[in-house]
Image (tube, rainbow, N blue to C red):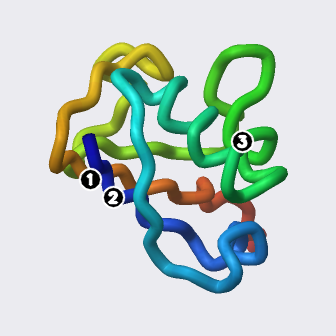
Amino acid sequence: MAIEVRIPTILRTYTDGEKAVTGEGATLSELFADLETRHKGIEERIVEGGQLRRFVNVYLNDEDVRFIEGIATPLKDGDSVTILPAVAGGSK
């Protein structure tokens, strides 16, 4: 089961600069654990305490996983996962 994972610039240090990598897993949690086996340190930048980190957005085929099943969201072969850091801040 191959799943494409698009990596934001800020996390590409974990993927040797790759913009996209592939992984496997029946759920997002399993996918992130699989990525960790090849890209040490990436999982802790995405997951904290068994949940997505507050300032990380994850999309499955362009749908925000927080509105599906979060880290337990099921995956299937050919899915596309996009990881995006949340944008915040600014002042007047």
Q: Is residue 16 left or right of residue 4?
A: right
Q: From the viewer's perspective, is 14 left or right of 79? A: right
Query: Compared to 39, does 48 lie above or below?
Result: above
Pointer 1 local density, CA inside 10 Å: few below 14, some 14–19, many at least 20: some
* Mark number, residue 50: none
Front residue of 18/70: it is 18
Q: Position of residue 29 (x, y in %)?
A: 53, 24
In the foreground, 46 or 34: 34
Indicate the amino acid at tag 1: Ser
Residue at point 61%, 58% (across, down): 85
Residue bearing mark 2: 4
Q: Residue at x 41, y 59 (%)?
A: 22
Q: Position of residue 41 (x, y in %)?
A: 83, 51
Q: Point out residue 51 in the picture as x, y percentages from the top left corner.
A: 65, 19
Which SS class for mark 2? strand
How far apart, in angstroms, are the residues tagged by discs 3 and 1? 17 Å
Task: Determine contact: label 1, label 2, CB under 8 Å.
Answer: yes
Residue at the spot 46% in from the left edge and 66% down from the top edge: 21
Residue 69 appears in which quarter of the rendering? top left
Are the two marked residues, 3 and 1, in contact with CB atoms closer than 8 angstroms? no
User: Label 2: few (<14), some or many (≥20) within 10 Å?
Assistant: some
Distance from Cα at disc 1 to Cα at disc 2: 5 Å
In the picture of the structure, the residue carrying the numbered disc 3 is 43
Question: Decide: marks 2, 3 in contact (CB < 8 A)?
Answer: no
Judge from the rendering whether residue 2 lies leftward or rightward of residue 46; answer left or right.
left
Q: Quadrant of the C terminus?
A: bottom right
Residue linked to disc 1: 80
